[in-house]
Image (cartoon, helix red, strand yellow):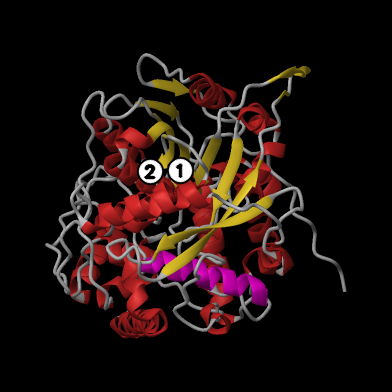
Amino acid sequence: MRAAALYSAAGSLLLTALTTAPAPAAPAAGPGSAEAHGTAVAARRAAAAGIDFGSCPKAEELPGAMRCGTVSVPLDYARPDGKRIELTVSRVRATHKDPADAGRAVRGQGALLYNPGGPGASGLYFPLVGMVPEWKRLAAAYDLVGYAPRGVAPSAPLSCRDPGDFFKGPRPAPTRPSDAYKKRRAAEAEAYARGCAERGGDALRHYHSLNNARDLEVVRAALGERRLTFMGGSYGTYLGALYAELFPSHVRRMVFDAVVNPDPGQVWYRNNLDQSEAFEDRWDDFKEWIAEHDAVYGLGDTPRKVQDSYEEASARLAVRPAGGTVGPAQLQGAFLKAGYYDDYWPHRAEALSAYLKGDPQPLVDQAGTRTAAGAVGAENANAVYTAVECNDAPWPTDFEVWDRDNTRLARRAPFETWDNVWTNLPCAYWRAPRQRPLDVRTAPGELPPTLVLAAERDAATPYEGALELRRRLAGSVLVTERDAGTHGIAGGPNACVNGHLEAYLLEGRLPARDASCAPRPEPEPREAAAPESD
């Protein structure tokens, strides 16, 4: 997701009412709906068939110790006897060995199923986390299970354009785009939406979050799990929230890490506006860190001077792209990733410093053209992201609405605002029917207690989303990593967070009330390499 909710002191966004076409479809989620019946039919079939785990697809380059299989799900849950697609599932069995005492056996607790978000991200690699020290206690008790959601290769992969054309660079990244530039990008967005419709055909309408939640129910049944133990990160939290609304009695334990705001009015247009605003604060955090380490990077000893260095690099790249492929947009994209994960801070600062000192190679390595295989995967991920978000909810169909809201927002949050517009603008021209977002709410006792994790300064899924989900899921408890902004905090370097995670997943134990943890340490700087002499 590229979305959620923090407003600046300048006040709330005054958003124009959404104008949408085609009209959103009525929610087909109730217990008596055709989709509910189709899900029950598919789950019974999956439970009977199970999953025949064997070698993983070679294209995924997964280690031999990991096993993979497929689960058949209906393309359209209203027609369970119609076309079906295959979801690829990966698994590593629980070790049943206590990492602190190799002679002590650990009782198995079934499968822990994970979705990493996106939408459009694959979870096939998730079981590998069992090799990381912070995950070994969980890996002892749980079969770690990942999967590629519908549309994500190799699970009936979607595509909207030729991957070879997807990452054409270099590109500009104006923070005050001209009318001509906006018109050109709008035309590109319309062409992309048309490509999705042409390549996806009638199936395109069935790639949305409600069906993703139904798929999760079928995978649960195929795994032989009576109730689901699930962890979702980022968009995976929205998927988990929908599952909790649709199938509350099938939930065993749920962890929501880096929470998407599930308010139906936020999904997805307003969420993306809020994300753009939050990234400005995170960009400020990064600049402050660089300024504190000016002795290492030489990019300026104040955030304003660091901004000047960044803008100087962007201006140079506009005239002469690094490596022929890295222009201002590629620079912005590389630094946007640092807004998600502060582990990137030393690498990005090092690359910017080296570039301004005459060595473009670190920047080319970090922001340059992808390999052919990488381009295929990235185009697929973007196609799924676009299809799911565009199908999920109403979007403005008049570019003037986007222009007015984002021009206002960009005055105080220029770093990500227009890039976020160009990413999501195909939804203005989408040709498939829209869903109407569910109003996720569970009453006391309807759902087992759940754990919500959030970093206080997460920009990708701002903190308000975690507060909103905690309000909507009765019995949930929120654990906050204070004054930190890395996107996703479970199983990372924060022992306090991991303690709450393990207590919940291993023992079913939650804090009596919302809790907080001190922030993780800031990253250590890395010395920029001096350019080689001729």
Asked if residue 507 lies left or right of residue 415, the reply is right
Asked whether the viewer can see residue 263, the reply is: yes
Q: Which residue is mark 1?
A: 232
Mark 1 touches mark 2? (CB < 8 Å):
yes
Q: Is residue 519 above or below residue 2?
A: above
Rendered image quadrant of residue 179:
bottom left
Secondary structure character of the magenta stretch overall: helix
Q: Nearer the viewer, residue 98 or 69?
A: 69
Q: Position of residue 424 (x, y in %)?
A: 35, 68
| Mark 2, secondary structure of its residue | helix
Q: Position of residue 71 (x, y in %)?
A: 51, 57
Q: Nearer the viewer, residue 257 or 251?
A: 251
| Magenta extent | 371-387
State yes or no: residue 385 in magenta. Answer: yes
Q: Position of residue 129 (x, y in %)?
A: 65, 41
Q: Which residue is mark 2?
A: 240
Q: Residue furthest front?
A: 48
**Amino acid at circle 2:** Gly
Quarter of the image that includes the N terminus: bottom left
Asked whether the viewer can see residue 151, the reply is: no
Q: Nearer the viewer, residue 179 or 429?
A: 429
Asked if residue 438 lies left or right of residue 326, the reply is left
Q: Position of residue 290 (x, y in %)?
A: 59, 46
